[in-house]
Image (cartoon, grey):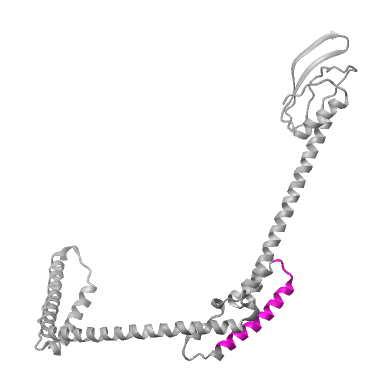
């Protein structure tokens, strides 16, 4: 591969032979850009790669050297220009600081004037329409007149009266929240959106309350059904005596969940038709216990209840 020399006679005028060198460099890049390296040409490929990097480094080194040489020649001028710019910027900063301080003082005084105008014009909406919601940035500009500010406040008050009348006409229990939504942005659409949102919340709460009431009623009906089932399948007592009598276990249905009746320590005394017995009821509901007690007392039975 042929190499080439870069000729620079005057750095300020560019490379003397730039066009032919650039054309040759592009040709080399095109050739090697589409080259497929084969196993038997690895050595030549490595050599060509090294030569390309060497020529590229030569061009880069010349750029760095020329930059340094010319930078040294203009260093004093660059420094002087920087000093002038810094000095001028410092003076401008001092002036800018004074201008901003003056402008802030003017705006502070203007804000006090705006407060006075607001107090005169706001009327009955002072509590609902604070100045922070009504104020406009342009009010502090020199070009904004007192009349313009009064007109803005007057228009806002007129619109507010109409909005308040409309909102009160809704008769909503959320009136305060709807009014607040209006005054926040002086926008009736915001007020209507708040009204809709709160009414949807009310509807959802009412629906949940109705569902809860329905669930409670269903639970109470289920409890009542279980109590009736207990009454239906309660033990049957026999014998005229006021003393407790022995009974056999009865077979209970799957519901209510009583797990059967368990007979414990059955004792029989041969005293005529009089018997002593004990029985255990498991997993009984309060209503079932009360029904059993009522049954025993109504029959005049002598019993002992242990929970």
Q: Is residue 267 magenta?
A: no
Q: Quadrant of the N terminus?
A: bottom left
Most extreme residue toward the right, as rendered?
Answer: 240
Left or right: 30 with respect to 243?
left
Number of numbered discs visible in the structure rendering: 0
Is 56 located above or below residue 202 in the figure? Answer: below
Q: Is residue 303 left or right of residue 125?
A: right
- For the C terminus, give its image quadrant: top right
Image quarter of residue 194: bottom right
Q: Position of residue 17 (x, y in %)?
A: 13, 87
Relative side of 144 to 298, left or right? left
Magenta extent: 149-173
Please state the horizontal and vertical placement of residue 95, each as a whole percent of the image: 31, 86
Q: Main secondary structure of the magenta part?
A: helix
Viewer-nearest residue: 62 or 267:
267
Give the camera-side residue of 139 and 298: 139
Most foreground residue, 202 or 47: 202
């Amino acid at each position: 591969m042929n190499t080439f020399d870069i000729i620079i006679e005057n750095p300020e005028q560019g490379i003397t032979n730039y066009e032919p060198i650039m054309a040759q460099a592009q040709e080399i890049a095109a050739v090697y850009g589409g080259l497929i390296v084969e196993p038997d040409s690895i050595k030549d490929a490595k050599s060509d790669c090294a030569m390309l990097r060497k020529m590229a480094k030569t061009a880069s080194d010349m750029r760095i050297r020329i930059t340094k040489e010319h930078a040294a020649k203009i260093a004093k001028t660059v420094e002087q220009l920087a000093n002038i710019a810094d000095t001028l910027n410092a003076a401008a900063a001092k002036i800018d600081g004074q201008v901003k301080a003056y402008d802030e003082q003017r705006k502070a005084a203007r804000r006090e004037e705006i407060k006075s105008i607001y107090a005169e014009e706001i009327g009955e909406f002072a509590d609902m329409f604070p100045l922070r919601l009504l104020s406009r940035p342009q009010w502090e500009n020199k070009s904004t007149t007192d009349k313009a500010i009064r007109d803005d406040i007057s228009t806002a008050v007129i619109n507010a009266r109409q909005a308040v009348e409309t909102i009160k006409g809704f008769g909503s229990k959320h009136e305060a929240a709807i009014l607040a939504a209006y005054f926040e942005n002086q926008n009736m659409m915001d007020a209507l959106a708040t009204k809709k949102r709160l009414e949807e919340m009310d509807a959802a709460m009412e629906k949940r309350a109705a569902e809860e009431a329905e669930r409670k009623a269903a639970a109470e009906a289920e409890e009542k059904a279980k109590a009736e089932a207990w009454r239906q399948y309660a033990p049957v007592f026999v014998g005229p005596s006021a003393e407790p009598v022995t009974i056999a276990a009865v077979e209970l249905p799957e519901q209510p969940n009583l797990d059967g009746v368990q007979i414990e320590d059955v004792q029989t005394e041969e005293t005529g038709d009089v018997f002593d017995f004990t029985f255990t009821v498991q997993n009984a509901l309060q209503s079932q216990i009360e029904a059993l007690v009522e049954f025993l007392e109504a029959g005049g039975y002598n019993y002992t209840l242990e929970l």
